[in-house]
């Protein structure tokens, strides 16, 4: 074994010597020997070699395309006459085909535009596009495609600067370089924020409602693909393969990148591999969830119905609440019951119109309104005026102006009744009603005998109902008794006046009584004196006492003991006078 | 066109964003600064040899409690450290930031003394500031408010970035 190493070394040296002899230093002899045959050797294999390499990694087309492109550009600029001659026979048919294709496309687009512009579907799509905040054309694309790649960015990994980008849409973004840098920064942020120990995290996918962003990371470059809709993972392998190809073809350029992206101008041929689209399946429409739609429609109908009923109930309640602003009504509470029913509690002055008629006048649906009403007396001026007018209406002889001055001519009796009713109105004092201008017709102005006799009998009734009370063992009139006598004095005088007019003999008995306390004679004297006191007071009040006779009848034992009446009563005896 | 990544660093409130805004019209919201700590703008600057598109990474204010994401410095062709002559501490912080940045990049750096429209309130003598500035490739006294020296500073850093 120790001798084997020198042997192996010497073998290697011998082989090197042989190579130098056969091929020359650095293979120059071999190259010079092959050179005359090089063309034929390459010619025999070049087609197969290109074909196999293209099939192996698809790298031939991106390399050759820019060469062909620049060759064509050179030909066009330097030998345009020759090209024109060559292309002339082709151009005619090409133009015809292009025009025909353009017209067909134009008609199809116009049809689609008209359909989408005037149909309900078109308006719905416009609304959806507006709601999503995207142009209508972009929304149409999203509806037509399951996904469609819009933009592909190739970003230098180290600096975050844009190497190249392509876009599927007609308008290109001016800010792709800024977006690239921000994407790089966001990737660094995510990597830093979510790193666990030494396990670096990288941004792979970013998704919004409409846009998906896929980021593939290579050693020197990042490929970012923005698409409408989600791209399935098997399709996304294209991005990874493209990035691998870019690293293979542009390996030197990526390593020596110093900010000048012009060396990546031809990479767009590879980037176009990433512009993937997939149209939506036409049968997708057939799989629409109709049961879901029907359920949604029913739910919407119910919701709208409920909302309408609730809105109406609220409107009704709101309208009813305005009743409190009217005089004579107070809404104490109101609420909605069972979606569309309204219940109200109201206080109402009887002078006002009923709640039902108010509801009817205001075009409200009374069927849905439940009213709980209680009466109350309103002191509001409007209601007091209504009550005053109501009283005035009962007396046709009277009228009232806007300042509550009452005028007219009325009989004394009616005037008394009117004043009673007037003063009984609650809150009448706030109106300052003036009755001083009312002219009261006295008895002597009444000529009708029948009326006079009726009045005479009323007076007799009133006189007969009058009783003058005395304290026990007293013959003097107390204050209340004096007032009673004054009051009856006026009636007696009226009755005497009518009696004279009707030629009636008017006689009045003033009868005094006493209780049973004391002896009978004393009681008799007491009753006589009480009758005399009343007659004297009548005379003092200017009553003609010529036909007034006072007498005492002593004890009257209607009830026992001291509770027996101590009073003076009146009795009128009348008869036609002798002619 | 050549693109170069430039980072703007400095303590909180020294005027980094104002300087950048004075120089460019950005499209990204300032919210990026507080969310991910950096906002990027671009501007084409002519130099003696060619036009350079600066990708300016305006980084969030740095203080002693909060450093910066060193990944944002990666690939930068140059960077700017901004200080505020109305705050003495901002120069100390600026030098600390330079020290931290040097752990991650050898790119050329520029010292910017900003807010020169205001009265100088820091107590550093000029020779001290000059000494500190020797660690940088250039020094500029700027005002984001009046625009003094802002364009010259960015032209200088564009030239530095392609050297």
Image (spheres, coloured by chain):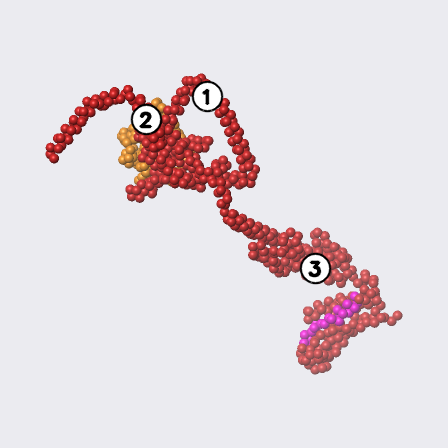
Chain colours: A red, B orange
Q: Secondary structure at mark 2?
A: helix
Residues at marks 2 and 1, common chain?
A: yes
**Other-residue count near label 2 (Cα within 10 Å), few / some / many at <14 / 14–19 / ≥20:** few
Task: Give the residue pinned by disc 3.
Answer: A422
Q: Quadrant of residue B76?
A: top left
x and y percentages locating residue A541 in the rendered image: 75, 67
x and y percentages locating residue B22 in the rendered image: 40, 31
Q: What are the residue bounds of the magenta stretch?
A: A455-477
Q: Quadrant of residue A270?
A: top left
What is the chain identity of the residue bearing mark 2?
Answer: A
Task: Give the residue pinned by disc 1.
Answer: A87
One can see residue B13 in this view:
no
Q: Is residue A366 left or right of residue A175?
A: right
**Residue sitting at the far right:** A579
- Work out whether A366 lies above or below B45: below
Residues at marks 3 and 1, common chain?
A: yes
x and y percentages locating residue B15 in the rendered image: 37, 34
- What's the distance in space between the residues labelled 2 and 1, CA to CA? 32 Å
- Specify whether residue A320 is painted magenta: no
- Going from N to C along the chain, the mark reached first, 2 or 3, is 2
What is the chain identity of the residue bearing mark 3?
Answer: A
């Amino acid at each position: 074994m120790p001798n084997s190493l020198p042997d192996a070394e010497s073998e290697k040296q011998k082989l090197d010597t042989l190579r130098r002899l056969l091929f020359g230093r650095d293979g120059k002899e071999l190259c010079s020997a092959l050179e005359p045959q090089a063309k034929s050797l390459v010619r025999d294999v070049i087609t197969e070699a290109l074909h196999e390499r293209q099939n192996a990694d698809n790298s031939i087309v991106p390399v050759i395309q820019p060469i062909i492109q620049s060759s064509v550009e050179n030909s066009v600029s330097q030998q345009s006459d020759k090209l024109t001659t060559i292309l002339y026979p082709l151009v005619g048919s090409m133009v015809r085909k292009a025009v025909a294709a353009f017209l067909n496309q134009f008609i199809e687009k116009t049809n689609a535009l008209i359909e989408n512009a005037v149909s309900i579907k078109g308006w719905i799509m416009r609304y959806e596009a507006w709601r999503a905040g995207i142009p209508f054309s972009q929304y149409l694309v999203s509806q037509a495609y399951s996904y469609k790649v819009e933009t592909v960015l190739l970003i230098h990994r180290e600096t975050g600067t844009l190497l190249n980008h392509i876009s599927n849409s007609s308008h290109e973004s001016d800010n792709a370089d800024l977006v690239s840098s921000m994407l790089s920064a966001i990737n660094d942020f995510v990597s830093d924020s979510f790193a666990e120990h030494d396990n670096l995290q990288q941004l792979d996918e970013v998704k919004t409602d409409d846009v998906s962003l896929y980021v593939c990371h290579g050693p020197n470059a990042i490929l970012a693909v923005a698409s409408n809709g989600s791209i399935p993972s098997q399709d996304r392998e294209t991005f990874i393969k493209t990035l691998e190809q870019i690293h293979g073809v542009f390996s030197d350029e990526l390593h020596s990148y110093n900010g000048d992206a012009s060396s990546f101008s031809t990479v767009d041929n590879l980037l176009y591999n990433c512009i993937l689209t997939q149209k939506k399946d036409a049968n997708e429409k057939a799989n629409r969830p109709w049961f879901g739609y029907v359920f949604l429609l029913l739910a919407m109908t119910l919701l709208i119905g409920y909302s309408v009923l609730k809105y109406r109930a609220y409107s009704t309640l709101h309208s009813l609440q305005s009743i409190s602003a009217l005089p004579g009504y107070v809404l104490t509470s109101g609420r909605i019951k069972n979606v569309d029913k309204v219940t109200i509690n109201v206080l109402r002055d009887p002078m006002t119109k009923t709640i039902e008629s108010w509801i009817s006048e205001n075009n409200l649906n009374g069927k849905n309104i439940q009213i709980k009403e209680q009466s109350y007396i309103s002191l509001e001026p409007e209601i007091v005026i209504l009550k005053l007018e109501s009283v005035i209406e009962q007396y046709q002889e009277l009228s009232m102006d806007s300042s509550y001055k009452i005028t007219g001519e009325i009989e004394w009796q009616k005037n008394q009744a009117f004043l009673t009713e007037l003063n009984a109105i609650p809150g009448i004092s706030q109106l300052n009603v003036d009755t001083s201008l009312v002219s009261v017709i006295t008895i002597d102005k009444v000529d009708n005998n029948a009326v006079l006799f009726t009045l005479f009998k009323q007076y007799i009734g009133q006189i007969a109902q009058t009783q003058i009370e005395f304290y026990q063992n007293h013959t003097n009139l107390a204050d209340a008794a004096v007032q009673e006598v004054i009051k009856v004095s006026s009636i007696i005088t009226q009755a005497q006046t009518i009696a004279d007019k009707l030629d009636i003999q008017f006689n009045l008995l003033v009868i005094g009584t006493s209780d049973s306390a004391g002896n009978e004679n004393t009681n008799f004297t007491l009753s006589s004196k009480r009758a005399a006191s009343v007659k004297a007071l009548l005379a003092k009040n200017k009553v003609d006492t010529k036909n007034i006779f006072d007498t005492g009848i002593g004890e009257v034992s209607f009830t026992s003991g001291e509770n027996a009446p101590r009073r003076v009563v009146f009795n009128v005896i009348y008869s036609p006078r002798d002619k | 066109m050549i693109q170069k990544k430039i980072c703007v660093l400095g303590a909180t409130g020294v005027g980094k964003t104002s300087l950048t805004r004075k120089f460019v019209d950005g499209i990204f919201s300032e919210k990026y600064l507080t969310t991910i700590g950096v906002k990027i703008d671009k501007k084409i600057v002519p130099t003696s040899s060619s036009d350079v598109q600066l990708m300016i990474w305006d980084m969030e204010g740095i203080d002693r409690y909060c450093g910066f994401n060193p990944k944002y410095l990666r690939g930068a062709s140059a960077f700017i450290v901004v200080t505020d002559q109305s705050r003495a501490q901002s120069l100390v912080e600026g030098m600390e930031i330079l020290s931290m940045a040097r752990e991650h990049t050898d790119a050329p750096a520029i010292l910017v003394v900003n807010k020169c429209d205001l009265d100088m309130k820091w107590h550093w003598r000029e020779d001290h500031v000059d000494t500190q500035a020797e660690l940088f490739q250039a020094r500029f006294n700027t005002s984001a408010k009046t625009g003094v020296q802002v364009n010259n500073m960015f032209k200088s850093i564009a030239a530095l970035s392609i050297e």
